[in-house]
Amino acid sequence: MKQIFIILFILVTNTIIGFTVTDDEIINQVMVLSNITGADDLLEELENLIGQLVNDPNDYYSNIGFNFTSCMTYLCYFRGTTISTLAMCIPLVSGTIGDTGTLKGKLAQRLKTEVTNYFFNQAYWDWEHYTSTGNPYVYPANYRKDIAWNHGQRVGPHWEKMYALWCYGYYTGDWTTIQNNWSFIRDRYNQGYKTPDNNQKSCIISYRPCDSTNCYIMSTYRNATNDLCNGLIGYVRMADRFNDSTRTQARTEAKSALADVLNRVNVSWNSAEWGDWAPGYNLSPEIGRWINDNTTARNNAQTRLDEAANAGALKGHWWCGFMNNFGKNSSNYTEDMWGVPNLSHELFLGRAWMLQETASSLRQVKPWHVIMGSVPEYRDMLYLRSLIALISRHATITWVNVN
């Protein structure tokens, strides 16, 4: 009788405590929000920001992610980050996708223009840059700055675009555009660097700021593990939908990337990865769920997030890194100059989607949107993704099979 009791206890304990989400479930399932309560102000804010974005006639795509000021402040988002973030907004704004007179319809149409113009162009996968003319450099209104913003190598932004393509198809329902360009998409999958080692310390962005006397190159190296994982997950979902022959291999690669993600959580915010908390960079709900379900990874995330929150340079204001730049100039990020790249949002997404903290606690540390420079806040993709994450903590979350 005692043995039976022990066996039953183990079974019950495993059911409640030891249950883990499988890597197949992470690949196959998407977060769906329902019963959103206590978030009317956040939904109204999101509605207002998206409304300004889709109705701004001057907000052309070539500089949707650019910010520049006299003190060399940059807000740079690759197109994949922009599209995946905006696509996640579609279920949260009013209207219907088929009616371009509504906000939901306007946003879907805008994303279709972006995807059609840029995502099926080889040049923007090999060497992405933001320009309306096709020239290698962008000349902002500030005549003292000449910024070349781009990435080489088939890592990081290469894979974020793949995840963005799935987000576009899923949230807009426009699978026809994806299917009509499937050969192109499959070729980009085949060309991408797929092993985690190839996505460590990769130079994925550089820019050339100039003043009145000289120009110089600033390059940023990032851990692009999240981008690789997101991209492979997005590709598998599309390949499954179209029953493509690459789907089995891609799923194996996605599982390898997911396993690697768990080993990359235990890093400091002030690491060699140019001062940002890499596990939170382009964090998706899927990766957050994966880390939350793994006890070791979740505990490591808790330790590292608390470490950042109590660090001398960040304590009491880690969520106020309003510049969220891409480079760093000093180890303690005095006055945020050239520092805190995306950091406040990376840490916030970690708390929202890795630790799954309560909405009430997250509201107290809601990151600031951009308040400096020439870019209006509705172009701040980092802020929009943090806003989505906060809204999700006010909701009932269901994980639904995508196909």
Image: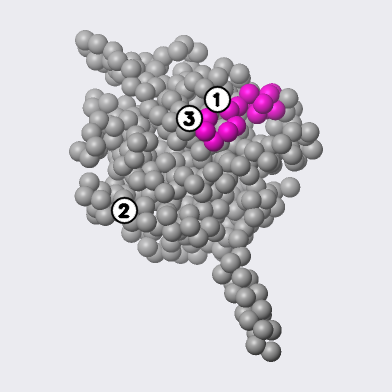
Q: Which mark is residue 154?
A: 1
Q: Nearer the viewer, residue 95 or 245?
A: 245
First in sequence: mark 1 vs mark 2: 1
Q: Which of 9 and 308 is in front in this view?
A: 9
Q: Is the magenta stretch mostly helix, strand or loop?
A: helix
| Residue 132 image point, x, y percent | 48, 17
Q: Which mark is residue 307?
A: 2
Name the quadrant of the N terminus.
bottom right
Answer yes or no: is residue 49 visible: no
**Element type at marker 1?**
loop
How dense is the environment of label 2, judged by Cα within 10 Å: few (below 14), some, or many (20 and up)? some
Q: Is residue 26 left or right of residue 157?
A: right
**Element type at marker 3?**
loop
**Element type at marker 2?**
helix
Label 3 sits on what residue type? Phe
How dense is the environment of label 3, judged by Cα within 10 Å: few (below 14), some, or many (20 and up)? many
| Residue 38 image point, x, y percent | 46, 64
Q: Magenta stretch: give its range.
A: 184-199
Q: Contact (CB < 8 A) between labels 1 and 2?
A: no
Label 2 sits on what residue type? Glu
The residue tagged 3 is 78
- Tally the marks: 3
* Residue drawn at point x = 31 percent, y = 42 percent: 270
**307 vs 136: above or below:** below
Answer yes or no: is residue 190 visible: yes
How dense is the environment of label 1, judged by Cα within 10 Å: few (below 14), some, or many (20 and up)? many
| Residue 204 image point, x, y percent | 45, 26
- On whether residue 196 falls in the magenta region, the answer is yes
Q: Contact (CB < 8 A) between labels 2 and 3?
A: no
First in sequence: mark 2 vs mark 3: 3
Residue 276: quadrant of the picture = top left
Mark 1 or 3: in front is 1
